[in-house]
Image (cartoon, rainbow, N blue to C red):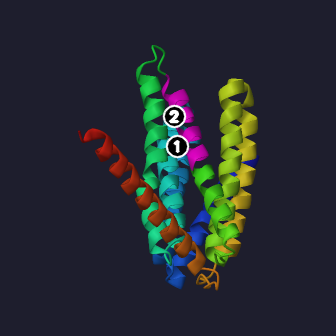
Amino acid sequence: MFSTALWLLAIALETALLVQAVRGKFLKHYSFFYLYLGIVLTRDLSLLPIYYIWPKAYGYAYWSTEFFSALAGCGLVWEVYKVALAPYPGAARMARHVLPFPFVFAITRVFVKAWNSPNWIPGRTTLETERDLRIVQATLLIGLVALFAYYAIPLGKNLKGIIYGYGLFLATMVVNLSFRDYLGESFHRWAQYIQAVSYLFVLTVWCSALWTYSQIPESEFAPRLEVDYQSLLRTTREKLISAQAHLLKGIRP
């Protein structure tokens, strides 16, 4: 009953966040975040009857849908970078080209490992995939927070709430998935309660931060990020040109 109550409360908070975003007409400002929330809500609503009516099928349904939830989380992290770096086209361009590689590498590594394994287990494979994806997401979020802390750039109430809430969610998920992988089924029940309670706290943070739309304030230090990026780009080009010149000089007779 306690786990069911936590589950239903999470569904109620997810619904409230989506309804409030539609009513306030700010769904478009964080479309990937609300898409992620919609996917999680749909997943919760579909898994709840399976858990009680077809309990034997619940494990398969859970891990099958958990993979898509983790992928949707990648979109959420991408949107955080997109929104936060919007005023800085140079840094945003670099992020757009670099960010996909860690996600693709994490998915590819786990599936290659599963393909070459004689004892392929869908649940365990999904667990490893999700853990790797969550670690990549957490690393990128930490990098973003460090970047904006260094340049003293305000994130705004909405974006800050998304980052802090999802950061807490990722930290809990990584710890839970690591213990699940190490301890197996003996930790499963504890993991369910820890995950459910922490997720409710995350939803509370989101409700507080995203109940109304708040624009990201401008910062007087903002241009410094773009200046540093252009300086890095210029230095890199100069070194590449110099290396090319040395290479051509060595090839010529």
| Left or right, residue 160 beside residue 94 | right
Callout 2 environment at 10 Å: few (<14), some (14 to 19), or many (20+)? many
- The residues bearing labels 2 and 1 have C-alpha atoms spaced at a distance of 8 Å
Q: In the rendered structure, does residue 191 fall within the stretch colored magenta? A: no
Q: Please name the predominant secondary structure of the magenta segment in the image.
A: helix
The one of 176 and 53 positioned closer to us in this rendering: 176
- Residue bounds of the magenta highlight: 121-136
Residue 102 position, x and y percent, is 49, 46
Name the residue type under label 1: Glu
Q: Residue at x 52, y 54 (%)?
A: 73
Q: Residue at x 34, y 50 (%)?
A: 244
Residue 111 position, x and y percent, is 43, 30
Residue tagged by mark 2? 126
Residue tagged by mark 1? 66
Residue 46 position, x and y percent, is 50, 49
The one of 235 and 228 positioned closer to us in this rendering: 235
